[in-house]
């Protein structure tokens, strides 16, 4: 059943729902949405309302592997059908779907699409929570949840593009449900959330915040034994699946309940003591890294380790590990878990002001106001002079001096927030130390920061470091099996092993291989292994939709200094056949021992070369360059000749 929009729309207008199967009604009557590919196009446009959607994105959603030559023409037909279905905007009879330089843009109002209405109600509910009006917050959040009909777009999830958007929508719904359940408990009405929490925990068994909310609602309802059983089941599940323990916060809650103490009441959504979470969806098919994950969770649960750097080559799964840990920590960070990318979409580095501005908005940090004559700089952080007289003076003060002073004020405000809140900050894909140095806690405090970076970021200290190498063969095969099915893996285990080794056992490359093979079901594993074994063809094969291993290698290559790129190009030949010794590096680089050591160590710092984990002399060490990075470096050297 499609619930009507919360506010009336023009007679004859269409109301769409994505929070469940894709459906549409006009004047209370369901509308036929056409064949599957047409519905995928419509779902993709509706998933990004009032935003241009490129032809490439639509093509990948409909034909993820091998689009026909007529793909663009077919898309035009599907979009034309959407135009007919949607009608005009009602303002000057303008079409709702228009094509521009950025792609197709669908114009739609809040009252015509359930996801827009959901977002508006959730925002209003959290604002009410911040004001302390918990009853209004609970009512608004419940109204938002009433729009949720089940797993979003559950009828179109065989399209990878639609499935990714559906997972993002479901993650938002789950977060709002958790917010609502916690407020109901705060109001003494936890029993209202018990049944819904039980159903959601069954579907998302590793989501700790759901478990905690369920425990509290059961305990408040007088069902203490069931509340304790929720914890015991979760502890056994974590131990069995991951070899982990529940977070310290959840363990403390269990002990309080066991002693028949007062039930823990989580802070209401949006209140000063809890800001929520902005984490992307939990990584699908997360495999391996058990020791690293156990170590990371242990560090973040301790009291003395507050900054952790996860480093490794491009495609080694740094972001996946950080996000996996962040999702598992749950209520270990009651003031929120926040994820911010430190690069733009094109791979260029964002300024520290931009990153700090986003963090301030997410965490509710009040940045000191600008002085007269100064306006907001990038990311909402004041810092650029408005107007100004001769010599770049604004209001009689040198513009540069004003920018520095205001930026320092913003940084001080951020540091004060970190010292007063227990939050987890994930700064993803850090290009260098300067990008994040001012964002890290200056002293020990309750918040923790996880950095992911290709390079080692040696200029940051003191920090704890986790260096990711390639997956072990068994882990890489487990990941491949999750994607293509264990039965197909068993048809030719030797070829499967060749595939993961040709990928350098990098999680990204194994994932791309699995996605390709999942679509190319007719392709024998041995034939695909032969393709990857060919140095001239391997990178051409490692493309799945808009995910390209070559592009990821290119991004890592661009991060290197010019001297390091030249050196890596010279090392790529001998290193491709296995490890390279210091003598081999001296020969390839055409230099003496000291210069070779400095060059190799510079590449280690940049994440382009891996070194032994134990202590060995320089001459005994065997240095390695990931196979796929070797292949890319050889391409660049060949193109430059």
Image: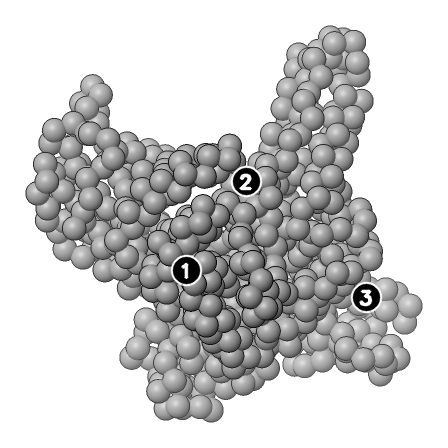
Q: Position of residue 289 (x, y in %)?
A: 59, 74
The colour style of the image is one colour
Quadrant including the C terminus:
bottom right
Q: Nearer the viewer, mark 1 or mark 2?
A: 1
Q: Secondary structure at mark 2?
A: loop
Task: Locate residue 545: give its quadrant.
Answer: bottom left
Q: Which tag, 2 or 3, sits closer to the chain's start?
A: 2
Q: Nearer the viewer, mark 3 or mark 1?
A: 1
Give the crowd class for mark 2: few <14, some 14-19, many >=20 residues within 10 Å: some
Q: Is the residue 505 above or below the residue 309 in the image?
A: below
The disc at residue 271 is 2
The disc at residue 221 is 1
Q: Which tag, 1 or 2, sits closer to the chain's start?
A: 1
Residue at the spot x=79%, y=73% of the render?
A: 585
Quote the CA–CA distance across marks 2 and 3: 48 Å
The disc at residue 601 is 3
Q: Secondary structure at mark 3?
A: helix
Q: Are marks 2 and 3 in contact (CB under 8 Å)?
A: no
Q: Secondary structure at mark 1?
A: loop
Task: Locate residue 578: give its quadrant.
Answer: bottom right
User: Horizontally, is 628 left or right of 180 in the view?
Assistant: right
Front in this rendered view, residue 529 or 633: 529
Residue at the spot x=67%, y=22% of the render?
A: 369
Residue at the spot x=36%, y=40% of the render?
A: 139
Q: Which tag, 3 or 1, sits closer to the chain's start?
A: 1
Q: Position of residue 9 (x, y in %)?
A: 19, 29
Q: Position of residue 176 (x, y in %)?
A: 41, 48
């Amino acid at each position: 059943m499609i619930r009507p929009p919360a506010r009336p729309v023009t007679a004859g207008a269409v109301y769409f729902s994505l929070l469940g199967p894709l459906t549409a009604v006009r004047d209370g009557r369901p509308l036929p949405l056409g064949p599957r590919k047409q519905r995928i196009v419509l779902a993709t446009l509706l998933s990004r309302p009032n935003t241009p959607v490129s032809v490439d994105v639509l093509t990948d959603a409909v034909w993820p592997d091998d689009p026909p030559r007529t793909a663009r023409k077919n898309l035009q037909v599907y979009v034309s059908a959407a135009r007919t279905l949607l009608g005009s905007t009602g303002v000057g009879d303008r079409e709702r779907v228009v094509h521009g330089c950025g792609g197709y843009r669908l114009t739609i109002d809040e009252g015509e699409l359930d996801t827009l209405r959901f977002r508006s109600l959730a925002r209003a509910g959290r604002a009410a929570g911040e004001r302390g009006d918990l009853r209004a917050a609970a009512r608004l959040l419940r109204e938002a949840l009433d729009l949720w009909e089940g797993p979003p777009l559950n009828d179109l999830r065989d399209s990878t593009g639609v499935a990714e958007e559906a997972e993002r929508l479901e993650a938002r719904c789950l977060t709002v449900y958790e917010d609502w359940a916690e407020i109901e408990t705060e109001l003494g009405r936890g029993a209202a959330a018990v049944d819904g929490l039980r159903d959601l925990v069954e579907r998302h068994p590793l989501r700790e915040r759901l478990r905690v909310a369920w425990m509290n609602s059961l305990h408040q309802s007088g069902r203490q034994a069931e509340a304790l059983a929720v914890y015991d089941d979760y502890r056994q599940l974590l131990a069995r699946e991951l070899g982990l323990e529940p977070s310290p916060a959840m363990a403390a809650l269990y002990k309080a309940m066991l002693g028949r103490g007062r039930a823990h009441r989580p802070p209401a959504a949006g209140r000063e003591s809890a800001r929520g979470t902005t984490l992307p969806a939990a990584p699908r098919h997360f495999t391996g890294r058990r020791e690293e994950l156990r170590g990371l969770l242990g560090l973040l649960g301790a009291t003395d380790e507050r900054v952790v750097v996860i480093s490794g080559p491009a495609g080694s799964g740094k972001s996946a590990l950080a996000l996996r840990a962040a999702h598992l920590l749950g209520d270990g960070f009651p003031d929120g878990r926040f994820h911010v990318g430190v690069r733009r979409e094109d791979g260029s580095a964002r300024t520290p002001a931009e990153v700090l501005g986003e963090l301030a908005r997410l965490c509710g940090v009040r940045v000191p106001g600008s002085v007269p004559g100064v306006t907001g700089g990038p990311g909402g952080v004041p810092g650029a002079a408005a107007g100004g007289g001769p010599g770049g003076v604004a209001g009689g003060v040198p513009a540069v001096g004003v920018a520095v002073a205001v930026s320092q004020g913003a940084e001080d405000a951020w540091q004060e927030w970190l010292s007063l809140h227990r939050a987890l900050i994930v700064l993803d894909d850090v290009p260098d130390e300067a990008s994040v140095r001012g964002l890290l806690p200056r002293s020990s405090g309750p918040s923790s920061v996880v950095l992911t970076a290709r390079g080692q970021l040696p200029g940051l200290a003191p920090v704890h470091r986790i260096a990711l190498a390639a997956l072990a063969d068994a882990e890489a095969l487990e990941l491949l099996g999750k994607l293509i099915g264990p039965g197909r893996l068993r048809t030719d285990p030797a070829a499967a092993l060749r595939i993961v080794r040709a990928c350098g056992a990098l999680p990204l490359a194994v994932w791309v291989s699995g996605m390709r093979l999942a679509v190319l079901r007719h392709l024998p594993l041995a034939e695909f292994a032969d393709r990857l074994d060919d140095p001239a063809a391997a990178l051409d094969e490692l493309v799945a939709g808009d995910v390209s291993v070559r592009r990821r290698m290119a991004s890592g290559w661009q991060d290197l200094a010019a001297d390091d790129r030249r050196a890596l190009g010279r090392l790529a030949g001998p290193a491709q056949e296995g490890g390279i010794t210091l003598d081999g590096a001296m020969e390839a680089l055409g230099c003496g021992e000291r210069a070779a050591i400095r060059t190799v160590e510079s590449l280690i710092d940049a994440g382009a070369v891996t070194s032994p984990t134990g202590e060995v002399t320089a001459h005994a060490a065997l240095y390695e360059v990931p196979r796929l990075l070797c292949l890319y470096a050889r391409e660049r050297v060949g193109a430059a000749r």
